[in-house]
Image (tube, rainbow, N blue to C red):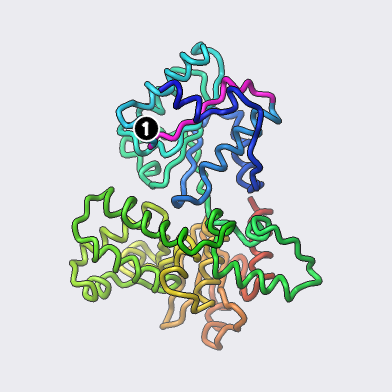
């Protein structure tokens, strides 16, 4: 194990660092939590950049904050060869290698922590018994569903979303002046097609996104939940992508696929728990929220497009607007057959209308709803203004 841990932690022996493309918002947030005792849990879709963010934080701690490299430990817990070792055993080996006492502060970066059975108890034990700052990641919402609530009061969750448009431009190496609006529009259309998976944005390799889709379906759904009917899972996923930005009726999906409604509901929960999709409830009282169909959004529009093809730019744009306001816990509004896309928990009423206008019925409903702010987001600039407002409010 010693040789493997040295390979995971090259900064123990070298000061050379790879050239990262920073995601400043996340990096600033993660570094701001360094001085707290909270266990920082990074969650999000597979290959969304959680590992890279961890290594950016490690680089900043050592290079910019002066932390002793020997007191910073990274481990990919799902790596072959570590499957028979507990988190505690692996961390204790780190303490032994670096001769660190329990009173000395160290930084632990534990990747894919949910692959270890009893991870929450082990993190709690590390938190309670050692002077450690823990950053842990998982591509599964099981981190958030900590059944025994062992981490309650000890954790801070940071969800990593796909690249936004400004990050997309940075990853593509594009520096476009506002005066060159036509170039910005062209880049934005490319962004709506490509999505925000960092490696896919960098390479543009269609085989990469196809392989990612296969991994998401097989590793995160079929294999993890031991599902024998692979065809139904794959067909269910295709229907989810087709319905992105629209209401999803489980009864109808179950009928199309020839499966039970309970099976369809279980599949939906599986895909939600791995951030492949997000669901939004209808606004209203609790019984209305529970009974009404949910709207579905893709975890990344590039993945959606790889499955459905490039069509319905309005639905793709709405998906991007959802990402910008997801943290505000939106629901969708439906009254007398007229729908408004989002009403947030702080009562921001938002309609995504890419290069379109509200219908007369929507306009009347839009003005009648009790809201603290009303926004029609209809363009690239509108989406950026919305994001700027969100960043300011945070």
Residue numbers of the magenta segment? 66-78
Q: Is residue 16 above or below residue 104?
A: below
Judge left or right: residue 55 versus residue 1: right
Report if residue 216 lies within the magenta region: no
Q: Looking at the image, which residue is at 64% across and 23% down?
A: 67
Q: Nearer the viewer, residue 341 or 30?
A: 30
Report if residue 69 lies within the magenta region: yes
Residue at image mark 1: 120
Q: Nearer the viewer, residue 281 or 352?
A: 352
Q: Looking at the image, which residue is at 53% across and 12% down?
A: 103
- Picture coordinates of residue 344 (x, y %)? 52, 62
Q: Which quadrant of the rendered structure holds the N terminus?
A: top left
Q: Looking at the image, which residue is at 35% across and 61% down?
A: 286
Number of other residues with Cα within 10 Å of mark 1, as a class: few under 14, some 14 to 19, many 20 or more: some
Residue 251 visible in the picture: yes
- Picture coordinates of residue 206 (x, y %)? 48, 64
Q: Is residue 379 above or below residue 279?
A: below
């Amino acid at each position: 194990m010693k040789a493997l841990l040295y390979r995971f932690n090259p900064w123990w022996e070298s000061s050379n660092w790879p050239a990262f493309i920073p995601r400043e918002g996340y990096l600033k947030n993660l570094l701001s939590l360094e001085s707290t005792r909270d266990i920082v849990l990074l969650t999000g879709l597979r290959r969304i950049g959680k590992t890279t963010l961890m290594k950016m934080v490690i680089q900043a701690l050592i290079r910019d904050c002066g932390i002793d490299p020997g007191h910073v430990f990274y481990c990919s817990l799902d790596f072959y060869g570590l499957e028979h070792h507990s988190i505690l055993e692996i961390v204790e080996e780190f303490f032994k290698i670096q001769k660190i006492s329990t009173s000395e502060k160290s930084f632990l970066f534990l990747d894919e922590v949910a692959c270890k059975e009893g991870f929450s108890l082990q993190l709690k034990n590390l938190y309670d018994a050692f002077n450690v700052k823990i950053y842990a990641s998982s591509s599964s919402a099981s981190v958030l569903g900590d059944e025994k609530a062992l981490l309650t009061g000890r954790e801070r969750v940071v969800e990593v979303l796909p690249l936004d448009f400004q990050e997309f431009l940075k990853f593509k190496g594009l520096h476009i002046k506002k005066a060159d609006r036509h170039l910005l529009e062209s880049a934005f259309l490319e962004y709506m097609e490509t999505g925000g998976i960092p490696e896919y944005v960098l390479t543009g390799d269609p085989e990469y996104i196809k392989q990612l889709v296969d991994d998401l379906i097989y590793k995160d759904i079929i294999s993890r939940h031991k599902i024998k009917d692979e065809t139904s899972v794959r067909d269910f996923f295709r229907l989810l992508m087709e319905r992105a930005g629209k209401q999803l009726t489980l009864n109808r999906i179950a009928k199309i696929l020839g499966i039970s409604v309970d099976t369809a509901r279980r599949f939906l929960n599986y895909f939600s728990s791995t951030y492949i999709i997000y669901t939004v409830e209808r606004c209203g009282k609790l019984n209305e929220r529970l009974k009404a169909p949910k709207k579905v959004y893709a975890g990344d529009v590039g993945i959606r497009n790889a499955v459905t093809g490039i069509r319905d730019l309005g639905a793709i744009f709405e998906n991007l607007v959802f990402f910008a306001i997801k943290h505000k816990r939106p629901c969708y509004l439906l009254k007398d057959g007229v729908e408004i896309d989002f009403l947030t928990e702080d009562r921001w009423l938002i309609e995504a209308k890419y290069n379109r206008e509200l219908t007369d019925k929507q306009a009347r409903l839009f003005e009648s709803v009790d809201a603290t702010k009303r926004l029609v987001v209809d363009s690239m600039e509108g989406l950026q203004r919305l994001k700027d407002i969100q960043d300011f409010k945070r």
